[in-house]
Amino acid sequence: VHKLFQVVPSGLAYCLDISPVLHRIYKCYSSEQGCADQAVGYHCYQVISFLISAYFFSYPHPERWFPGRCDFIGQGHQVFHVFLVLCTLVQIEAVRLDYSERRPLYESLHGDLAHDAVALFIFTACCSALTAFYVRKRVKAYLE
């Protein structure tokens, strides 16, 4: 039951987050010209590697297939992390390609908002620090 409460919310959040990417993949491959966008291929690999990592997170098969042989290397959780790292690397490359190939589109839509992004990052970091200090103070008072 514990694993179910981890997997279902994460899966729903992933479906929500990945839906624009899946729409882009579908539009690219369903067009009559075929898919010439190089980043879409990386997005496909990202989705596939994430689904494989989710599978190994949910079902620890190597331990079941080879009992006693996966005590140190080859555990399902380790395989999960390997595919999750692969997912992240492929996603970074896809985003890099998207940014370099679609930069004129993004600039025409949003202009030069780099200073806004930096200000938002600083604001978020300050809010996180204030929250951490507040929680630390409350926990310290509770423990005393």
Image: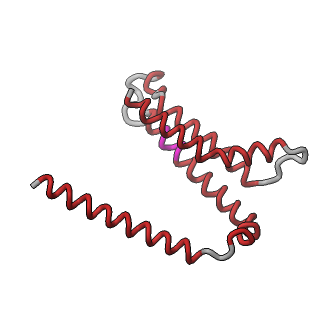
- Image: 31 above or below 60: below
In the image, what residue occupies the spot 48% across and 26% down? 61
Q: Is 26 one of the magenta-colored residues?
A: no
Residue 65 point in image, percent of width and height: 48, 22
Name the quadrant of the N terminus: top left
- The answer, for residue 74, to whether it is visible in the render is no
Q: Is 82 one of the magenta-colored residues?
A: yes
In the image, what residue occupies the spot 75% across and 71% down? 108
Colour pattern = secondary structure
Residue 29 point in image, percent of width and height: 81, 43
Q: Is residue 10 left or right of residue 20?
A: left
Q: Quadrant of residue 83?
A: top right
- Image: 113 above or below 49: below
In the image, what residue occupies the spot 55% across and 71% down? 117
Residue 54 point in image, percent of width and height: 52, 36
Q: Is residue 86 left or right of residue 97?
A: left
For the stretch drawn in magenta, the main secondary structure is helix
Residue 22 point in image, percent of width and height: 69, 44
Q: Is residue 68 left or right of residue 90?
A: left
- Image: 56 above or below 102: above
Q: Quadrant of residue 3?
A: top left
- Image: 59 above or below 33: above
Q: Nearer the viewer, residue 72 or 9?
A: 9
- The answer, for residue 105, to whether it is visible in the render is yes
Q: Residue lying furthest right in this view? A: 32
Q: Nearer the viewer, residue 31 or 57?
A: 31
Q: Which range of residues does the magenta coloring cover? A: 79-84
Name the quadrant of the C terminus: bottom left
